[in-house]
Image (tube, helix red, strand yellow):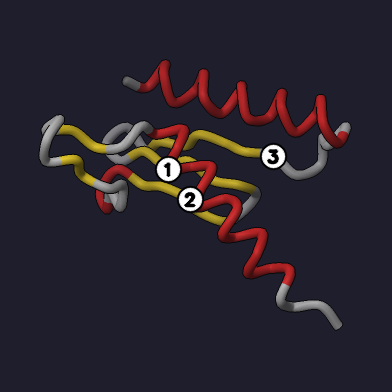
């Protein structure tokens, strides 16, 4: 499971670079060996011990990680945008 999260982080960082040539701000995958986190800079977007993804009863599974990360990331950017001076 760890490899799929690392691959997702790589994919999102590549997308940021391709669209914006962004290399300063990036997604990261972190683990302490028990818990896992996906972050954007210092903002935690997902952590394994508090999985906030939508659970689909019909499929008996959580929504795809990429869908969740994109939604939370875009919401984070929208919230940041409200802090304009």
Residue pushed farthest bottom? 85
**Residue name at image x 47 percent, y 37 percent:** 30
> Could you tell me which secondary element the residue under label 3 belongs to?
loop
Q: Residues within 10 Å of mark 1 (few under 14, many from 20)?
A: some
Badge 2: residue crowd in 10 Å (few <14, some 14–19, many ≥20): many
Q: Work out whether residue 73 or residue 48 is closer to the camera in this orientation and state it.
A: 73
How far apart, in angstroms, are the residues tagged by discs 3 and 2? 12 Å
Q: Say above or below: 24 vs 21.
A: below
State the residue in front, 43 or 34. 43
Q: According to the image, label 2 marks what residue? A: 45
- The label number, if any, that marks residue 68 in the structure image: 1
- Left or right of 20? Residue 15 is left
User: Can you say which quadrant of the picture contains the N terminus?
Assistant: top left
User: Which-is-in-front pick, marks 2 and 1?
Assistant: 1
User: Gap between marks 3 and 1, in whole Å?
Assistant: 17 Å
**Decide: marks 3, 2 in contact (CB < 8 A)?**
no
Q: Earlier in the sequence, mark 2 or mark 1?
A: 2
Disc assigned to residue 26 = 3
Q: Residues within 10 Å of mark 3 (few under 14, many from 20)?
A: some
**Proximity of marks 2 and 1: CB atoms separated by less than 8 Å:** no
Specify the quadrant of the image occupied by residue 37.
Answer: top left
Q: Quadrant of the C terminus?
A: bottom right
**Kind of element beneath mark 1:** helix
How many angstroms separate mark 2 from mark 1 (CA)? 9 Å
Q: Earlier in the sequence, mark 3 or mark 2?
A: 3
Q: How many marks?
A: 3
Which element type, helix, strand or loop, lies under badge 2?
Answer: strand
Residue 60 spot, x, y in % from top left: 11, 33
The residue depicted at 41 percent of the width and 19 percent of the height is 4
**Residue 48: x, y in percent?**
30, 43
């Amino acid at each position: 499971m760890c490899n799929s999260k690392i691959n997702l982080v790589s994919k999102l960082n590549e997308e940021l670079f391709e669209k914006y040539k962004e290399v300063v701000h990036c997604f990261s995958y972190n683990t302490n060996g028990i818990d896992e986190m996906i972050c954007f800079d210092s903002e935690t977007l997902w952590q394994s011990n508090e999985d906030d993804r939508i659970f689909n009863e019909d499929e008996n599974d959580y929504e795809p990680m990429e869908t969740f990360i994109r939604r939370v990331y875009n919401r984070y950017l929208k919230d940041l945008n409200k802090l304009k001076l």
